[in-house]
Image: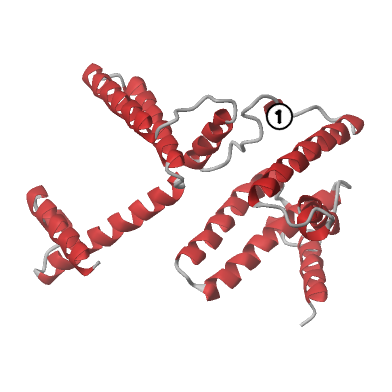
């Protein structure tokens, strides 16, 4: 195999798809904004293949994700902004710059020293990027200022909450004990109870959002990824509900034909069986 030639062939195919008159009508009408949701979707499909331990799917999904990079790079090249080679050069340079303890003279560093050096390098990168934008006559992004800068708005909401809180903690705006976060969760559930009693839908939604935000903070305090926690909870629910369906199927019934009491009893039965086997 010749990886360099393989990537060149992919770039050539993308260029052909985007060639007016002979290319694909669908590909030709796309732009950065219309392709962005597909890019996010492909990243999630990569993560799903990893979670399932399916390396056959992972190979295909990584290819789909790579196609997204090539697609965006091709559109940028058409505008005279940059090409795929510039993307590769940028990440290559960044990796070398961010790892002087591997590629440079900063050897034998402790993990803490590596983390501190990483912060210094990223700060310098941020300054360099701001200078480059100014030289190009580009305005500074609105979100690029303040302690909470740099957290993409398109992240999954729980992950974004985690990152926002982590940034706030760098200036001391944080609880110093996970149990204090639990107290805040109790406070938020009480406020949801009040909102439910008032029947104000907007207030109920706001309080639920506050609760989810604090739960993400609790996950951060115990060094857990809130998104991963919810993914695991979703999988557990799917697995246990499938157990309910299987039990009812053996009786020739479907979930819609069972009472809530029966469904709850079966749920507890499946739950006990899982715990016994684990």
Is residue 277 positioned above or below 156 on the image? below
Which residue is depicted at the point 80% across and 38% down?
Answer: 124
Instruction: Kindly indicate the quadrant of the structure image that contains residue 263.
Output: bottom left
Which residue is depicted at the point 28% across and 28% down?
Answer: 186
**Left or right relative to 136: residue 158:** left
Residue position for label 1? 144
Q: Residues within 10 Å of mark 1 (few under 14, many from 20)?
A: few
Tell me, yes or no, if residue 53 can be seen here: yes
Helix, strand or loop status at disc 1: helix
**Left or right relative to 92: residue 200:** left
Q: Position of residue 198 (x, y in %)?
A: 24, 16
Q: Foreground residue, 173 or 199?
A: 173
Residue lying furthest bottom in this view?
1
Q: Position of residue 81 (x, y in %)?
A: 86, 46
- In the picture, the quarter occupied by the C terminus is bottom left
Instruction: Kindly indicate the quadrant of the structure image that contains residue 171.
Output: top right
Q: Position of residue 46 (x, y in %)?
A: 55, 62
Q: Foreground residue, 141 or 42?
A: 141
- In the picture, the quarter occupied by the N terminus is bottom right
Is residue 262 positioned above or below 64 on the image? above
**Left or right relative to 278: residue 104:** right
Coloring scheme used: secondary structure
Which residue is depicted at the point 77% across and 42% down?
Answer: 121
Tell me, yes or no, if residue 20 can be seen here: no
Disc tally is 1
Q: Position of residue 41 (x, y in %)?
A: 55, 54
Residue lying furthest top in this view?
198
Instruction: Kindly indicate the quadrant of the structure image that contains residue 272.
Output: bottom left
Q: Foreground residue, 271 or 17?
A: 271
Is residue 121 positioned above or below 231 on the image? above
């Amino acid at each position: 195999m010749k990886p360099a030639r393989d990537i060149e062939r992919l770039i050539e195919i993308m260029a052909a798809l985007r060639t007016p008159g002979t290319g694909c009508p669908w590909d030709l009408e796309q732009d950065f904004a219309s392709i962005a949701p597909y890019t996010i979707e492909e990243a999630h499909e990569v993560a799903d293949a990893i979670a399932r331990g399916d390396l056959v799917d992972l190979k295909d999904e990584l290819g789909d994700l790579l196609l997204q990079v090539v697609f965006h790079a091709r559109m940028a090249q058409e505008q005279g902004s940059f090409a795929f080679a510039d993307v590769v050069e940028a990440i290559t340079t960044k990796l070398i710059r961010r790892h002087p303890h591997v590629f440079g003279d900063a050897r034998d560093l402790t993990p803490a020293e590596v983390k501190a050096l990483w912060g210094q390098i990223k700060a310098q990168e941020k300054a360099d990027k701001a200078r480059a934008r100014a030289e190009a006559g580009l305005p500074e992004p609105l979100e690029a200022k303040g302690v909470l800068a740099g957290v993409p708005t398109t992240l999954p909401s729980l992950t974004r909450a985690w990152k926002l809180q982590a940034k706030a903690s760098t200036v001391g705006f944080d609880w110093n004990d996970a149990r204090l976060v639990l107290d805040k969760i109790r406070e938020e559930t009480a406020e949801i109870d009040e909102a439910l009693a008032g029947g104000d839908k907007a207030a109920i939604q706001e309080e639920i959002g506050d609760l989810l935000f604090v739960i993400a903070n609790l996950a951060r305090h115990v060094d857990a990824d809130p998104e991963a926690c919810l993914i695991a909870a979703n999988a557990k629910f799917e697995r246990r509900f499938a157990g309910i369906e299987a039990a009812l199927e053996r009786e020739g019934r479907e979930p819609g034909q069972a009472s809530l009491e029966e469904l709850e009893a079966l749920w507890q039965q499946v739950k006990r069986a899982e715990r016994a086997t684990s």
